[in-house]
């Protein structure tokens, strides 16, 4: 290969614009050409030294990374399902509490004690409201904790024996 073509490929290499095929052509030209200028001899020595130190990718690394990502994804889905189950249980508990409270007040009104229990009803309604707000606040905090734990999941080779 001509010196000016090798120089042009070296310029592309140093500017970062060289394509993989062009890089292989450059390496081949530097390896095969025995009548290079002294500066191209230095370039050849440097590029061949860099090429000899190229990192090797372990066999099956891509598959192990895909498996690790899939496991993390399944864990995130499981945590999400657990949160939804907990939220559904909280909603059912709230419904049962409200229903039992309404049933208790219906029994009182059926017995003719409405007038005497009216003030207690207002006080109890405030207590129920506070309890509902507390339950919803706890659900919200649990949701935030779950989201934070999902976001903090990282691939850690010491905890994943397959990686």
Image (cartoon, grey):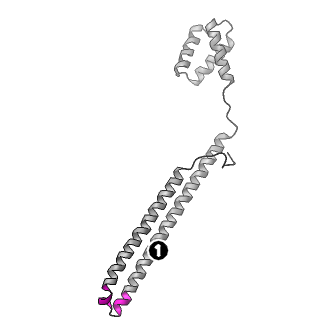
Q: Position of residue 52 (x, y in %)?
A: 69, 23
Nearest the viewer among 163 and 66 is 163
At a point 33% along the width and 91% down the height, the residue shown is: 113
Question: Is 29 one of the magenta-colored residues?
Answer: no
Judge from the rendering whether residue 18 lies leftward or rightward of residue 36; answer left or right: left
Q: Position of residue 161 (x, y in %)?
A: 69, 48
Instruction: In the rendered view, tell whether residue 125 sits above or below residue 153.
Output: below
Which residue was labeled with disc 1? Answer: 93
At a point 56% along the width and 50% down the height, the residue shown is: 153
Q: Position of residue 30 (x, y in %)?
A: 65, 13
Instruction: In the rendered view, tell whether residue 87 sits above or below residue 44.
Output: below
Mark 1 secondary-structure assignment = helix
Judge from the rendering whether residue 124 lies leftward or rightward of residue 67; answer left or right: left
Viewport quadrant of the C terminus: top right
Judge from the rendering whether residue 118 lies leftward or rightward of residue 92; answer left or right: left
Q: Position of residue 123 (x, y in %)?
A: 34, 79
Viewport quadrant of the N terminus: top right
Judge from the rendering whether residue 91 lies leftward or rightward of residue 82; answer left or right: left
Look at the image and give the residue range highlighted in magenta: 106-118
Q: Would you say the magenta stretch is mainly helix, strand or loop?
A: helix
At a point 43% along the width and 74% down the height, the residue shown is: 94
Instruction: In the rendered view, tell whether residue 1 sits above or below residue 150.
Output: above
Instruction: In the rendered view, tell whether residue 54 sits above or below residue 141.
Output: above
At a point 44% along the width and 61% down the height, the residue shown is: 140
């Amino acid at each position: 290969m001509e010196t000016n073509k090798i120089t042009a490929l070296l310029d592309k290499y140093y500017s970062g614009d060289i394509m993989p095929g062009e890089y292989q052509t450059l390496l081949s030209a530097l390896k095969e050409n025995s009548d290079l200028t002294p500066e191209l001899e230095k370039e050849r020595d440097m590029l061949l030294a860099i090429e000899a130190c190229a990192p090797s990718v372990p066999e099956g690394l891509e598959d192990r990374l895909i498996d690790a990502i899939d496991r993390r994804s399944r864990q995130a889905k499981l945590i999400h399902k657990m949160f939804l189950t907990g939220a559904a249980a909280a909603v059912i508990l709230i419904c049962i509490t409200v229903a039992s409270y309404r049933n208790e007040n219906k029994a009182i009104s059926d017995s003719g004690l409405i007038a005497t229990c009216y003030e207690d009803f207002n006080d109890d309604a405030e207590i129920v409201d506070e309890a509902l707000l507390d339950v919803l606040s706890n659900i919200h905090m649990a949701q935030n904790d779950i989201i934070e734990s999902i976001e903090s999941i990282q691939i850690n080779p010491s905890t994943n024996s397959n990686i």
